Amino acid sequence: MLAWADLREPQVRTFSRSSPGGWLLRSLLERYDHEHAFRIKIALVARQQTGRPDQDPKLLVSPIVNKECPRCQWWDRCLPQLDPDDVSLRIDKAPLDMREIATLRRHGITTITDLVDAELDQLLEWYLPEVSHRGGAEGRIRVAARRASMLLEGTSFDRETIGPIEIPQAEVEIDLDIESSADGRVYLWGFLLQYAGESGAVYHEFSQFDDLDNQSEAALASDAFTWLRSIVDATPSALVFHYSAYEVAKIIELARREHTELLDWAASYAEEHFVDLLEIVKAHYFGVSGLGLKLMARHVGFSWRDDDPGGLNSQLWFAEAVHGETAELRSRARRRVLEYNEDDVTATSQVRAWLRAQ
Ligand code: SF4
């Protein structure tokens, strides 16, 4: 598919002091020209620095942490210039954008302590007109202030409801987690199978450490669902738990592409019998850095065997497991992926048990 975007078309919501609504749609080229001109001004002022603060002109910008920082070559220079409690450094979930942070700083609010100490209703009077480029700006600053307060208290999660948390229960409970390669192919289906009243849980995995195509990806999924169907046929009340909508979305995508009887069954079964634990967690908790499985599971006392667990890392390990230079490297990467996946399903099961105990 070829898509054509007219860069002169006004389509980006930008701040505008002169516009009655406080914002205007501008084209990407206008935005580029404006930002480029500003960078030239920044550079010209920076070039006048002599190292004598009493005589040097004030720099036009100071670092504001944003999503480019982790990959930016200047990070080592910028980090020391930030207060360790800088709002942009500490609040990493739904972070305020550069204009929002710059507006707070202009009014003396730099750290999370400053933000917590601010009287929010008064702050909104000068803050909102300056951040009208953002829909929902009031909600964003209120949530940021809540996060700042939790950070100061050292609280990771706030319960938003009271009473027991209802989690569906079954004679057979299965936790599912899938791993996919960088090109989105599911190469690993991991299940943790647990029978009510029995102490141990058993991990079952269906994996193929190869560059998959449509056919091999569907064949692997069929192996996984042949197994799952045999469990479900024997115990129709079985439930499958997962954490996030990704698993169900992937199964539906595969079924729509392949149209086999088994994958159609899997898609209908997933829509009707799978339980997304994340949705339950969202209904009851607010997390200072979100409600991801890694955070939640660590909160309940679970730890991964790997020092650096994460979906993106698992894609790198998969690539190494398939294309690593030596058999030993490939084997080690393969073991790492499988352990990571087993820990993911175990974490899901432990979060589930913890929620039930609340
Ligand atoms: S590290 Fe510094 S220069 Fe790089 S994006 Fe972040 S604030 Fe900007």
Image (cartoon, rainbow, N blue to C red):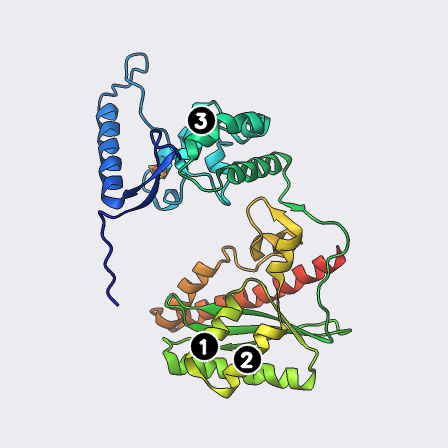
* Residue 329, horizontal then vertical, whole percent: 40, 68
* Residue 137, horizontal then vertical, whole percent: 48, 38
Quarter-wise, where is residue 57 in the image?
Answer: top left
Circle 2 residue: 266
Amino acid at pointer 3: Arg
User: Residues at badges 1 and 2 in contact (C-beta under 8 Å)?
Assistant: yes
In this rendering, the answer to whether 57 lies above or below 245 is above
Q: Nearer the N terminus, badge 1 or badge 3?
A: 3
Circle 3 residue: 105
Give the Cα separation between the discs numbered 3 and 2: 53 Å
Circle 1 residue: 254
In which quadrant is the N terminus drawn? Answer: bottom left
Q: Nearer the viewer, residue 32 or 175?
A: 32
Q: Nearer the N terminus, badge 1 or badge 2?
A: 1
* Residue 180, horizontal then vertical, whole percent: 44, 68
Give me the residue at 48% from left, 32% from top.
Answer: 86
Q: Is residue 316 left or right of residue 283?
A: left
* Residue 288, horizontal then vertical, whole percent: 58, 44
Q: Which secondary structure lies at badge 1?
A: helix
Q: Is mark 2 within 8 Å of ligand 1?
A: no
Amino acid at pointer 1: Leu
